[in-house]
Image (tube, rainbow, N blue to C red):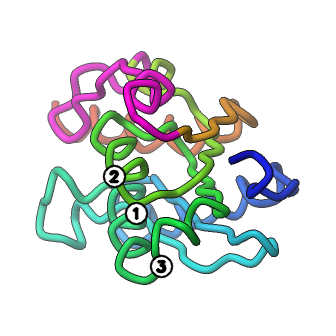
Amino acid sequence: MTDLLPDLDHAHFLRRAFAVAEQARQGGDHPFGCILVDAQGQVVLEQGNGFTAEGGDMTAHAERLLATRASKRFPPAVLASHTMYTSAEPCAMCAGAVYWSGIGRVVFGQSEHSLKEMTGNHPENPTLDLPCRTVFAAGQRPVAVIGPLLEAEAAALQQAFWNESKTSES
């Protein structure tokens, strides 16, 4: 499978996913974002978190929404050569969606463990501390994983949002 995956500029594409996360935040949503890059290095899809945009849907994570859109647009054999760049490590639900869609590689910024430490038991983000590598390892096809990368930049996207959110709950 690794023969299908191109060498890409991970920092460049992660920062693009960070920009999508910031756009989601500016639009009133949780600051998560991801992009899908094809084997030629072209961004073919981008997706911000959809919690607010989807009417409070707790499952409207950016990665799950992008994987669903990708699986409707491309067959798994094509997605095997695509890379998802995401601001934060896919949770167990999102990792399952990535696996089922056929996406071949995930590159993430902030780890799920780091996110959980930052957000605590927030009702809008009850983070599972379950690495996506563990989810993918239970599958029958490989999904390459790279990350965390640029974790401090990725965490900065989250820190202010969840601090503000905790303050507004008080």
| Between 62 and 55, the one nearer to me in the picture | 62
Image x and y of residue 144, in percent: 63, 39
Label annotation for residue 97? 2
Could you tell me which residue is drawn at 69 percent across and 35 percent down?
A: 146
Residue designated by label 3:
74
C-alpha separation, residue under disc 1 versus residue under disc 2: 6 Å
Q: What amino acid is at disc 2?
A: Ala
Of the two numbered discs 1 and 3 in the rendering, the one whose residue sits closer to the viewer: 3
Residue designated by label 1:
67
- Mark 2 packing: few (<14 Cα in 10 Å), some, or many (20+)? many
Q: Quadrant of the C terminus?
A: top left
| Between 131 and 105, the one nearer to me in the picture | 105
Q: Earlier in the sequence, mark 1 or mark 3?
A: 1
User: Within the image, what quadrant is residue 156 found in?
Assistant: top right
Q: Which residues are magenta?
A: 117-141
Image x and y of residue 17, in percent: 62, 60
C-alpha separation, residue under disc 1 versus residue under disc 3: 10 Å
